[in-house]
Image: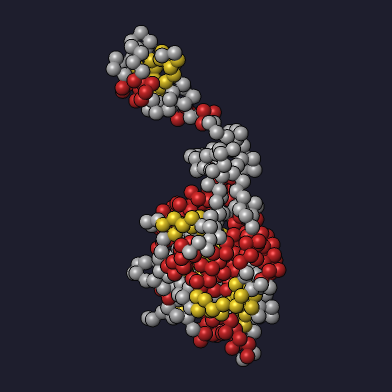
Amino acid sequence: MSNQVALTGNEVMAQAMRQINPDVVAAYPITPQTAMVQVFSQFVADGNVDTEYVTVESEHSAMSATVGASAAGSRAMTATAANGLALMWEILYIASGTRLPIVMPVVNRALSGPINIHCDHSDAMGARDAGWIQFFAENAQEAYDNAIQAVRISEHEDVRLPSMVNLDGFIISHAVENLEILADDEVEEFVGEYHADNYLLNSESPIAVGPLDLQDFYFEHKMQQSVAVENVKDVVLKVAEEYKGISGREYGLFEEYKLDDAEIAVVALGSTTGTAKAAVDNLREQGVKAGLLKIRLYRPFPAQEIADALKDLKAVAILDRAETFSTTGGPVFADVKAALYDIKADVEATNYIYGLGGRDIKVGEIESVFTDLQQVVETGNVEQTINYLGVRE
Amino acid sequence: MVKPGDGYKDIPKGGLILEVGNAKSYKTGGWRTERPILDKEECINCHLCWAFCPDSSVLSEDGDVKAEIDYDHCKGCGICAYECPVNAIEMEKE
């Protein structure tokens, strides 16, 4: 039995955490995630959850305590944003390398400096190779749904990897949205109980966690991670199918919006995909065959599937809310372009870096990207591969 | 138990060690560049080397330093030679 509610993204993620009812949460507040852990800590104080809430002095400690709790055998969560995620860096790799199925909402915010608290994806994109599964959401509903599914995906025996559930800072985290949350017992049944294969608090079968792992075995353990991430796509689809059964909402690796017969399209992730849908609708009304591919699962990257979905286009623009300072464009662009190369697709691909530090992106700007793509198709010539959308000269 | 040369399909995930007390079977003596040699004639059996050895590689039995070093685990740090009050231990290049 679902409930229609009007909540901010942070509030509904706190509700997801309450319904997941993790054994341990260790978190440190940081804008724009603060309200999420604040609301959740109230649930702890009110006895609405069985969670042990560990107040820590930094995000480095938050992730460390979460790692410890997970290694001990508990279902453990944390949440962060931006510089908080950056401070967790060292321990992110320990969580994934130790194969701990931690689920962590990340409220995407620009990394300083200069100091900025608003939305972009530089935090999550910087951590894209840390061995975590990464989900992105168009809105609070998807962020909530991703959080609940992430528990099952991370804990799946073929996966056992941590997940970052990304939601755009302020745009999703602070805006009130009308959405559906599942009944508490439905979530309880869906996530089930977590049973670690081996865990520190098992006195019957004592183990060592995090030992020195040198030239003779470290590579083999990294190989195990590579195998595990290969398994993620199938598990994501299986869990999505099951989740559809209780929620009625469909999820895949990505969403194709009016992409079937499209000649030009944009690829994006996060809240901008909602804006892009409005642009696609406007162009469709003008008879332009425009489409959108919205990435939900960014790590591991579903390269083959995305390339197959884009291969019949004439031109595609990839939108990136993060800069890599590599002079080769944004991170999503690099991944999509490599995927197209692998299948030898004959599609012109351009890159638009936008929205850094929370700079608003408007429907008209995305329409202008489609206009550029039309130009590419007409002339057969890409004038500028890497573009910066909405920046002043 | 994990054996040297085991492949990624056969070892526990995440580097976990599932058997207790198995550090002894992981031989680390190969890290050594110098080996301690104990002169039994000079040794006064004070056990300082035994107490200071960070790898428990100076062996003692029934109150006697047996003039034996566990070369499977001694890493050649030389603390025993440094601490020995009668210079009964010398470090020799491997």
Where does residue A254 sit, x and y in percent of width and height? 62, 70
A375 or A4: nearer the viewer: A4
Compared to A155, does A168 lie above or below?
below
Looking at the image, residue A278 sits to the left or right of residue A42; the answer is right
A45 or B55: nearer the viewer: A45
Q: Is residue A366 visible?
A: yes
At a point 54% along the width and 31% down the height, the residue shown is B22
Residue B31, image quadrant? top left
At a point 56% along the width and 80% down the height, the residue shown is A178
Where does residue A337 sit, x and y in percent of width and height? 57, 67
Looking at the image, residue A310 sits to the left or right of residue A89; the answer is right
Q: Which residue lies furthest to the top in this view?
A: B41
At a point 64% along the width and 40% down the height, the residue shown is B10
Where does residue B93 sit, x and y in percent of width and height? 39, 22
A321 or B67: nearer the viewer: B67
Compared to A5, does B25 lie above or below?
above
At a point 61% along the width and 66% down the height, the residue shown is A184
Q: Is residue A126 visible?
A: no
On the rendered image, what quadrant is the N terminus of chain A found in? bottom right
